[in-house]
Image (tube, rainbow, N blue to C red):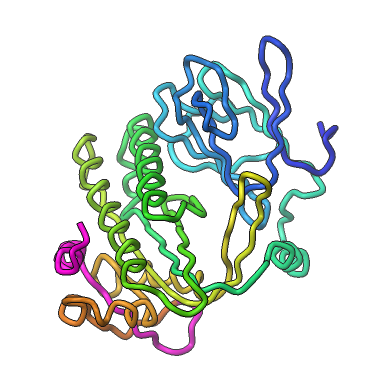
């Protein structure tokens, strides 16, 4: 069924007929009963903030349940973790049935064409901006999925995604991507200068994410405590608005973004909770206790020929750093 051309879309089946909802102009769409959702569905079985649909630059779509009370289902199976959507998938929110359509002309091929991917990215790029990118990942997530009841897992992960989104929005950013068991957020700075206050907001956010994770973990019967790790990198990236009108949707691509993901992975190598790039550290160096609490390490980041200098810190030491700089 491709009567709507090349546009990916949802088709809602209601008592009054079918409702067409195009998945364009943004990289994610919220679904729920509240009117502030992109897709508001009047169904008492649907939670106020029920789920998120996330798209990627390669035109893949993910469905993420936000710990909804009655669950989200794909083809009759409950969604516990972010799941890739396929053309003609049947989605159920509460008692509302929705069909997902991804026209053949834009479906991701088995062997992506590099030129096509490049053209897509180029069309979204507007300018070169100074950014800080944060990637936060759940530790031992695969092990957790094997040991935890599916319904409990869905509630845990959904609540974590929702709370993480709130914390990051309060810090002046947004969740740019939901990637399996990880999230990515971007902060835009001025063309040259980055103030200590700006950097403090970012590190305050990651500290709050850790506290939220600990509180959430304690409220579920988990086989082991839920933990997170974070990579933060600062530098220039190509950014663009893929949204429109009242819904601007900025994203970034380039080495600064890639390195943030690699730095998060490096936290396991240096056995610390947070790993930051050298440029990020330079903007912290003049703040109180930065030199004593952040420790330098040489690491081999995947995809990089040379060793990289990263500075690591534990969440406990991060609290001391924030307190020393009057960041509550």
Q: Position of residue 312 (x, y in %)?
A: 26, 74
Q: Position of residue 182 (x, y in %)?
A: 42, 54
Quadrant of the image occupied by residue 125? bottom right
* Residue that appears at 37% across and 49% down: 170
Q: Position of residue 313 (x, y in %)?
A: 23, 71
* Residue that appears at 48% across and 14% down: 44
Quadrant of the image occupied by residue 172? bottom left
Viewer-nearest residue: 225 or 210? 210
* Residue that appears at 49% across and 72% down: 190
Quadrant of the image occupied by residue 119? bottom right
Q: Is residue 96 magenta?
A: no
Q: Is residue 327 magenta?
A: yes
* Magenta part of the chain: 302-328
Quarter containing the C terminus: bottom left
Viewer-nearest residue: 230 or 83? 230
Q: Position of residue 1 (x, y in %)?
A: 81, 31
């Amino acid at each position: 069924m491709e009567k709507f051309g090349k546009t990916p879309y949802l088709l809602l089946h209601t008592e009054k007929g079918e409702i067409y909802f195009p998945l364009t102009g943004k990289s994610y769409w919220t679904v729920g009963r509240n009117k502030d959702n992109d897709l508001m569905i009047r169904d008492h079985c649907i939670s106020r903030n029920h789920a998120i649909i996330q798209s990627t630059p390669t035109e893949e779509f993910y469905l993420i349940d936000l710990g909804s009370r009655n669950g989200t289902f794909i083809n009759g199976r409950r969604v516990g973790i972010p799941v890739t959507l396929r053309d003609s998938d049947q989605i159920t929110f509460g008692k509302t049935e929705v069909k997902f359509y991804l026209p053949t002309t834009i479906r991701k091929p088995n062997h992506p064409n590099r030129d096509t991917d490049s053209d897509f990215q180029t069309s979204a790029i507007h300018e070169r901006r100074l950014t800080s990118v944060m990637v936060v990942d759940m530790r031992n997530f695969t092990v957790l999925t094997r040991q935890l009841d599916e319904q409990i897992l869905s509630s845990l992960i959904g609540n974590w995604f929702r709370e993480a989104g709130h914390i990051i929005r309060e810090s002046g950013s947004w969740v740019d991507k939901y990637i399996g068991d990880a999230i990515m957020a971007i902060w835009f700075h001025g063309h040259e200068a980055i103030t200590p206050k700006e950097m403090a907001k970012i590190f305050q956010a990651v500290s709050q994410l850790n506290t939220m994770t600990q509180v959430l973990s304690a409220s579920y019967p988990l086989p082991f405590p839920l933990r997170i790790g974070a990579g933060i990198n600062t530098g220039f990236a190509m950014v663009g608005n893929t949204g429109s009108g009242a819904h601007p949707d900025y994203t970034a691509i380039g080495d600064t973004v890639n390195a943030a993901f690699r730095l998060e992975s490096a936290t396991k190598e240096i056995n610390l909770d947070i790993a930051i790039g050298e440029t990020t550290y330079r903007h912290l160096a003049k703040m109180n206790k930065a030199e004593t609490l952040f420790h330098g390490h040489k690491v081999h980041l995947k995809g990089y020929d040379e060793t990289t200098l990263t500075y690591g810190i534990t969440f406990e030491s991060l609290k001391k750093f924030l307190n020393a700089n009057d960041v509550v």
